[in-house]
Image (cartoon, rainbow, N blue to C red):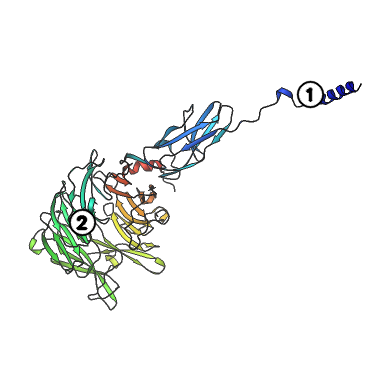
Amino acid sequence: MKDSLRLTLSRAVFLPLSILALSCGGGSSKPPPKDPPQATLNVPKPNTAGQKLTVQVSATGCDQIQSLSIYDRDTFLKSVPYSGPGIVPVDLAANEIKYTNGIAAQLSLKARVVCTDGRQNDSQPQPATFFPAAEVVEAPSGGQLVPDNFVTEGTLPYIYFIGCGNAEGGIPKLFKVDKNGRSQVDPVNMPFLCTSGTVITPKNPVSGKRWVWTPGAGAMAIDSNLKITAQVDIPLDLLAVGQDGDAVISDLGSGGSPSQVARISHVDGSIKWSYPPRGFVINTPLPRVDDVMVATITTDSAPTGKANIVVSRVDYGRQNPATGGIELGNYIMKTVASNGVLPNSAPPNAFSPDGNQLYLSFTGVGNITQIFACSTQAAGCSGTSQRWATPPTLNAPLAAMVPYAAGTKLAAIAVQKVWFLDASTGAVLNKGGEPLIPEGGLVVLQVQSGAPPYAQAFYFLTGPAPRENLPAPQPLEIVATDDPAKGELYRYQINAGSLSAAMDDSGTLWLRVGGDLVRPLSPPEYRQQVPVTP
């Protein structure tokens, strides 16, 4: 009886378990949901200039993949044929990238995988900068194709790059290379220093030569094979080239000699004439066909505490070499405050290309700046001798003024702002009247004007502000406009290394980007991607 009872109780224990199993669905229960798939996207070169941007993508976690796509934020860019497994490279062509926010494109790229069962997921976003360009020549690892600063000679396919650098042992040399960095002639030892301030002038159409000069060090004339035909040992401060290829230099007396403006032969380096300027030379002398325009500041004939800005015409000596260096006349442009008995500074100024105007910039209270276009053929810079009826007013002190577009426009350059003026009227041409500005805390370091057929284009290069007792900073950014009224055309910045720019004989811009060489697209090609907005 006890055993029978024990059996009954035992069955009583097991019976509810079977009932419980039936009540939970038994073998027909649903499996737990699957984990979402995983996508990855990597950008091997996050800052790229060229015709394409290469990324690497992969996807896992799908029984079968329906699609793998690349997005910039929420904007679809491209579908990727992918069957897996593993990482595959994908090229985003320049025309597959959207430039909604301008050029260069600042991208936030992600990959999106979608499974056939409906599951999907996005990769983590990856930043990238893409600057579309016509051509990029990549330097060998750790190398550099062209000198830090260069000029170009010729046009494609015969394009060459001339610049200086310091070879082993610090010996300054001049180089001429092709776009692949191959020397075209043997490098030439320079008789003076090569610095970031060394200037190489355009090729003169008459002499076929260039002048290479370093402020405070010396100058030399070179032919297309880098042969030195003339040398100047004077520690000059300014240099311009006459129409016949001779140099006109200004030496402010830094070498111990009296201040002088002199014409130097491109044939043998001899001094053809020397002119004692009326005061401190305040900008580069401007050689014309038969004369040289020289702007100076002097206290002569000025009231106490004041100084006169004077423009003198000096005979170039073309028609009669014996009269070269003789002053033909002078006019006082403006009387300004003097910084001493022998003033050595003046308000920012520049000659127009024809020398008929001297642009002068004056800054007052609150950094309010006015620019005047003074006739160099009359005194006073007022009435009819001041070209603009209403001088433009800007809200920052200027560092420089640069005429361009055959003298029809004037770039007014402050440390962190750039305006463009109509040279005929003084009207501000910038879109909405607003200046173009560098990125962040960068400042304008260099400028490059356009050349036909893109003479209306203008470029400025920006970088960190100069600091005392440190090497001169190099540009990190280039900003371009094809027409001031249309605003910015493009802006391209790198995080490390440096940029430099030069224009070739066909008006094509070339950039050194770190060690690589980049040929950007033409301004009209960029404008197609960046439509003008009101």
- Left or right position of 396 against 187: right
In this view, the mark in front (1 or 2): 1
Q: Identify the residue at image location x=27%, y=64%.
A: 374
Rounded to the nearest angstrom, the CA distance separating label 1 from label 2 is: 101 Å
Question: Amino acid type of disc 2?
Answer: Trp
- Left or right position of 86 against 421: right
Question: Amino acid type of disc 1?
Answer: Ser
Q: Quadrant of residue 397?
A: bottom left
Q: Quadrant of the N terminus?
A: top right
Q: Residue 144 placed where, x, y %?
A: 29, 45
Q: Identify the residue at image location x=32%, y=62%.
A: 388
Q: Residue 468 placed where, x, y %?
A: 34, 63
- Left or right position of 13 against 113: right
User: Which mark is drawn over residue 18?
Assistant: 1
Q: Is residue 390 visible?
A: no
The local crowd at label 2, few if under 14, some if 14 to 19, many if 20 or more residues have their Cα within 10 Å, is: many
User: Depth check: 317 or 388 in front?
Assistant: 317
Q: Which residue is mark 2?
A: 213
The local crowd at label 1, few if under 14, some if 14 to 19, many if 20 or more residues have their Cα within 10 Å, is: few
**Residue at disc 2, secondary structure:** strand
Q: Identify the residue at image location x=32%, y=39%.
A: 135
The relative height of residue 63 versus residue 51 in the rendered view (above or below) is above
User: Depth check: 277 or 135 in front?
Assistant: 135
Q: Is residue 155 visible?
A: yes
